[in-house]
Amino acid sequence: MTVSPTDRSAKLRWGVLGVARIATKKVIPAMQRGRWTEVDAIASRDAGRARDAAAELGIPKAFGSYEALLEDPDIDAVYIPLPNHMHVEWTRRAAEAGKHVLCEKPIGLTAADAEQLIEVRERTGVRIQEAFMVRTHPQWLGALSIARSGRIGVTRSITGYFSFFNDDPANIRNVKAYGGGGILDIGCYLVNTARMIFQDEPRRVCALVEESSATGVDWMASMILDFSGRHAIGTCSTQLAHGQRITIAGTMGRIEIEIPFNAPPDRPCRIFVEDAPPGEVPDRHTIEFETCDQYTIQGDLFSQAVLEGTPAPYPLEDSLENMRVIDALFRSGRSGEWERNPSQGAQALR
């Protein structure tokens, strides 16, 4: 589907596979406010839940199966907020039905899953994107711009923290077969944003991973990513008090992102910048970004790309690189050793 960029009336018609809370409480309402997005259908394996969600959100169509929604010729694209282990199957099935796909992170459970979806994209010709919404938020774009400008000197260190508390063994985040655990759920953000700021891939990684004896999922993990002399370190946990913060440090200053991942859609976001020549006390500046919803921006950018016939804003190739790092972190957690990132090749450790 391609339209002229001058056709200001065009909107991409979306369907949603599933009634997960992130969809009904965050993503769908945000996309309904979009300039280029229109949510026309929602599906659940429970027809009653689909009807209830459609009524609550003002969505015209409700389907009692995912297959039925994919058969609707009036739906152009689907958003997939299903449990992690279902991402690859339903992304593939949606693409084969001719629908463009925005799938929640992680795109799959392993790098091999991401490779499979690249093949699906090439075979079907649709756009497929992993929903790393933080990449669209102005505060992250601002932090990236400052880091690249030289204002804080040479960027050498990134530290991150992301946690919440959920020890319910029945919750999908704590079910190993569903792809539960902290690294895939929230640690992926620490990896993704470090790669974004450094504009590079780590040559090797090391991780300390704590797993629940009851569920088998990782409930706390600390990681080191070695970007050839530049370091990213972080901790993620699903059984610690809620918290999140990112600090980007350079030779002449640093950037602190106050609420890096769950950026509030109802008030401005702030980052703090400290910069000064070496040896001097840095000045602290607050940069405030206008109120926005990163899910609205994400949906609009993807929709606009489809409507105008341009590539997906966040390519699957980048998702593949992210999953390769995550795979290496899991290997390190098991081996207790540094693990090479295969993207870096044999030259990486010399």
Image (cartoon, rainbow, N blue to C red):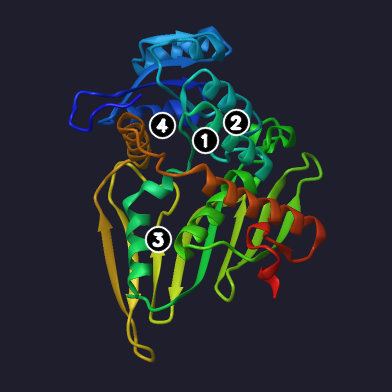
For mark 2, give the secondary structure: helix
The disc labelled 1 sits on which kind of residue?
Glu
First in sequence: mark 4 vs mark 2? 4
Viewer-side label of 2, 3: 2
For mark 1, give the secondary structure: strand
First in sequence: mark 1 vs mark 4? 4
Query: Residues at badges 1 and 2 in contact (C-beta under 8 Å)?
Result: yes
Name the residue at 39% across, 59% down: 258
Residue 238 appearing in the image: no
First in sequence: mark 3 vs mark 1? 1
First in sequence: mark 4 vs mark 3? 4
Mark 1 is surrounded, within 10 Å at the Cα level, by few (under 14), some (14 to 19) or many (20 or more) other residues, namely many
For mark 3, give the secondary structure: strand
* Tag shown at residue 104: 1
Tell me the CA gap for discs 4 and 3: 22 Å
Using the rendered view, name the quadrant where residue 174 is placed: top right
Q: Position of residue 95 (x, y in %)?
A: 52, 24
**Along the viewing direction, whichever of 102 and 137 lies nearer the viewer:** 102
Name the residue at 64% across, 63% down: 344
Name the residue at 49% across, 56% down: 193
Tell me the CA gap for discs 1 and 4: 10 Å
- 153 w.r.t. 104: above or below: below
- 101 w.r.t. 159: above or below: above
* Tag shown at residue 257: 3
The disc labelled 4 sits on which kind of residue?
Val
Mark 3 is surrounded, within 10 Å at the Cα level, by few (under 14), some (14 to 19) or many (20 or more) other residues, namely many
* Tag shown at residue 87: 2
The disc labelled 2 sits on which kind of residue?
His
Q: Is residue 277 left or right of residue 4?
A: right
Q: Position of residue 14 (x, y in %)?
A: 39, 22
Assign the N terminus to one quadrant of the image.
top left
